[in-house]
Image (cartoon, grey):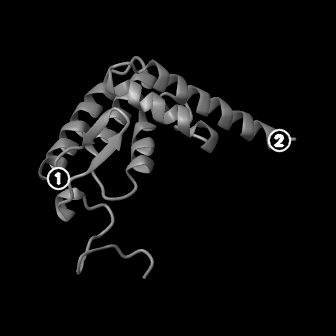
Amino acid sequence: MATARFHGPHYVPPGDTRTTTRHTVYVNTPTGRIKFCPYTMVDSELLAICRSAKALMENMTNPFAVASWLHLVLARCHPFDDGNGRVTRLVASIPLLLAGYPPICISLDQRSAYWQAINETYTGNHGPFIQCIFDGMKRAIDRVEGLKD
């Protein structure tokens, strides 16, 4: 079955976090090694992220800032063995959708700028990431508008 995921001899249902698979994730970058949330803390971290996101969205004045924060904390948590980027962009789109904006859309030619912007958010500078979200939205809207002709 193409949708089945196995961790060793055991089946892991989609949606189970790294708490189930017990994977600790590291990424090597040019500036050093990044360790993501330890698998023992993923579920509690997700709960804290959800609570904080709910509170932020209830009093939201800047949906782009909330989307950037959500993207940052979910990406840093890295809760799943696969699909973290897709899930992160989808969840980070929620405050934008609630404010009447389109979801986050990053085209292939934006990937380099997207990764650079993500790295900037780790230092506390969310401006490039918010600009990346905005540029992706504009490109997507322009492509949709082009379909009318």
- Please tell me which residue is depicted at 40% across the width and 55% down the height of the picture: 83
Of discs 2 and 1, which sits in the foreground? Answer: 1
Q: Which amino acid does label 1 sit on?
A: Tyr
Which residue is identified by label 1?
39
- Please tell me which residue is depicted at 16% across the width and 48% down the height of the picture: 38
Residue 131 lies, in percent from the top left, at: 53, 23
Residue 57 lies, in percent from the top left, at: 34, 28
Residue 61 lies, in percent from the top left, at: 40, 17
Q: Is mark 1 on a helix, strand or loop?
A: helix
User: Is residue 46 toward the left or the right of residue 67 in the image?
Assistant: left
**Quarter holding residue 7:** bottom left
Residue 130: in sight, yes or no? yes
- Please tell me which residue is depicted at 56% across the width and 35% down the height of the picture: 102
Which residue is identified by label 2?
148
Q: Which amino acid does label 2 sit on?
A: Lys
User: Is residue 24 toward the left or the right of residue 72 in the image?
Assistant: left
- Please tell me which residue is depicted at 31% across the width and 58% down the height of the picture: 81
Quarter of the rendering occupied by the N terminus: bottom left
The number of numbered badges drawn on the structure is 2
- 2 and 1 marks in contact (CB < 8 Å): no
Mark nearer the N terminus (2 vs 1): 1
Question: Badge 2: few (under 14), some or many (20 or more) residues near its Cα, within 10 Å?
Answer: few
Quarter of the rendering occupied by the C terminus: top right
Q: Tell me: residue 59, above or below residue 41.
A: above
Q: Is mark 2 on a helix, strand or loop?
A: loop
